[in-house]
Image (cartoon, helix red, strand yellow):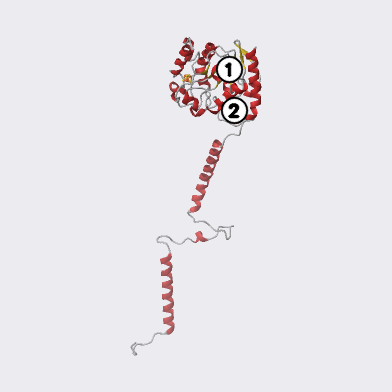
């Protein structure tokens, strides 16, 4: 510093420093503030009566007020949808299985594309079966039959086994896998048990003394039960078979054969143990051999039924 330069008053220098510091402080405040937005003290002041409570951003309050009815409306719609999609409480006595036909929503399917009602009158096989004058003709008709959907999955039709002049006829429900492969009813384990019942129980010969057939002549896929319409379509073949064989005693094996022969939907336990006279023949239902293999305790009841059948044969 030049010694000739007069020294400034220390008080003035201090005042200038203070002013400079204040300017810097104001500038620093201005740099930390968002551009173009003046500070709004009201935004950081507690709301009257809610001292200490956090106050949301002033711009958010109207939005929250506007969003609240929307949220409430959404909740109401959701609750309504929940009510609509929640399954109705089950009706007394059983589960709810959906609307009754009269309550169902109108179908969008045009009437012309709806499933046609089941045909009434005799099945298409009735005339074919009636036209067969011998068992050979009937077997040929069955072999060429395509009257129901079971024809598409069969390997071959299964017509009969045994003696066509026998006085005792066994009737099963439908071919299984092995019957479908061999074209012969009651082969495999259940067939062996039937053979034992005939030979060891009744003292008869399966090839000479009995005739064996099924209600349905083609194997249902997967060994499922034959459907009512399949049984109805195939029924004329069995009816004509019985006419041509003309047995004295018929033993239906299992529920499907029993209910078909007796036209009675009762359980096998109720159908068996009796002799029912139909068209001059004795009908004596009993358990299917496959069921006996699964439930050996029922063999005693089956043996009682077989004794009833033998008594009818001896009349
Ligand atoms: S199950 Fe009877 S009706 Fe059906 S295709 Fe076979 S033979 Fe014909």
- The tag earlier along the polypeptide, 1 or 2, is 1
Label 2: which secondary element: helix
Residue 30 placed where, x, y %?
42, 66
Between residues 120 and 145, which one lies in front from this camera angle?
145
Kindly identify the residue that appears in the image at 50 percent across and 59 percent down. Answer: 43
| Number of disc labels | 2
Q: Residues within 10 Å of mark 2 (few under 14, many from 20)?
A: some
Q: Is residue 177 left or right of residue 279?
A: left
Query: In the image, which disc is placed on residue 233?
Result: none
User: Circle 1 — which element?
Assistant: helix
Dividing the picture into quadrants, the one containing residue 93 is: top right
- Res 247 quadrant in image: top right
Q: How far across and how far down the image is residue 204, in percent?
A: 59, 19
Residue 100 appears anywhere in the view:
no
The residue labelled by disc 1 is 261
Label 1 Cα crowd, 10 Å radius (few <14 / some 14-19 / many 20+): many
x, y percent for residue 228 = 53, 21
Report whether the residue tagged 1 is closer than 8 Å to ligand 1.
Answer: no
Percent x, y of residue 315: 65, 11
- Kindly report which numbered mark, 1 or 2, lies closer to the viewer in this rendering: 2
The residue nearer to you, when weighing 31 against 91, is 91
On the question of residue 244 being in view, the answer is yes
The extreme bottom residue here reads 3
Name the residue: 43% across, 71% down: 25
Q: For the N terminus, which image quadrant?
A: bottom left
| C-alpha distance separating marks 1 and 2 | 19 Å
57 up-or-down from 205: above or below: below
Q: Disc 2 marks which residue?
A: 291
Which residue shows up at 41% across the image and 72% down it? 24
Respond yes or no on whether mark 2 lies under 8 Å from ligand 1. no
């Amino acid at each position: 510093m030049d010694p000739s330069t007069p020294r400034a008053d220390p008080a003035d220098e201090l005042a200038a420093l203070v002013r400079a510091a204040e300017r810097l402080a104001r500038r620093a405040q201005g740099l930390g503030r968002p551009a173009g937005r003046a500070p709004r003290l009201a935004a950081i002041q507690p709301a009257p009566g809610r001292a200490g409570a956090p106050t949301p951003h002033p711009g958010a309050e109207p939005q929250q007020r506007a969003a609240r009815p929307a949220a409430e409306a959404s909740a109401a719609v959701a609750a309504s949808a929940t009510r609509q999609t929640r399954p109705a409480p089950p009706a007394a006595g059983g589960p709810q299985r959906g609307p009754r036909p009269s309550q169902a929503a109108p179908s969008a399917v045009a009437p012309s594309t709806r499933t046609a009602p089941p045909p009434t009158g005799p099945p298409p096989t009735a005339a074919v079966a009636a036209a067969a004058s011998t068992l050979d003709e009937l077997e040929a008709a069955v072999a060429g039959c395509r009257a129901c959907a079971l024809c598409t999955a069969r390997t071959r039709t299964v017509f009969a086994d045994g003696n066509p002049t026998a006085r005792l006829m066994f009737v099963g429900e439908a071919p299984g896998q092995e019957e479908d492969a061999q074209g012969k009813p009651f082969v495999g384990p259940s067939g062996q048990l039937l053979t034992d019942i005939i030979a060891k129980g009744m003292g008869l010969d399966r090839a000479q003394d009995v005739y064996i057939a099924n209600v349905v002549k083609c194997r249902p896929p997967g060994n499922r039960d034959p459907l009512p319409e399949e049984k109805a379509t195939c029924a004329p073949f069995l009816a004509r078979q019985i006419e041509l064989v003309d047995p004295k005693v018929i033993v239906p094996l299992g529920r499907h054969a029993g209910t078909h022969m007796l036209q009675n939907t009762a359980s096998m336990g109720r159908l068996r143990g009796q002799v029912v006279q139909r068209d001059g023949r004795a009908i004596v239902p009993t358990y299917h051999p496959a069921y006996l293999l699964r439930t050996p305790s029922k063999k005693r009841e089956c043996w009682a039924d077989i004794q009833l059948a033998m008594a009818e044969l001896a009349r």
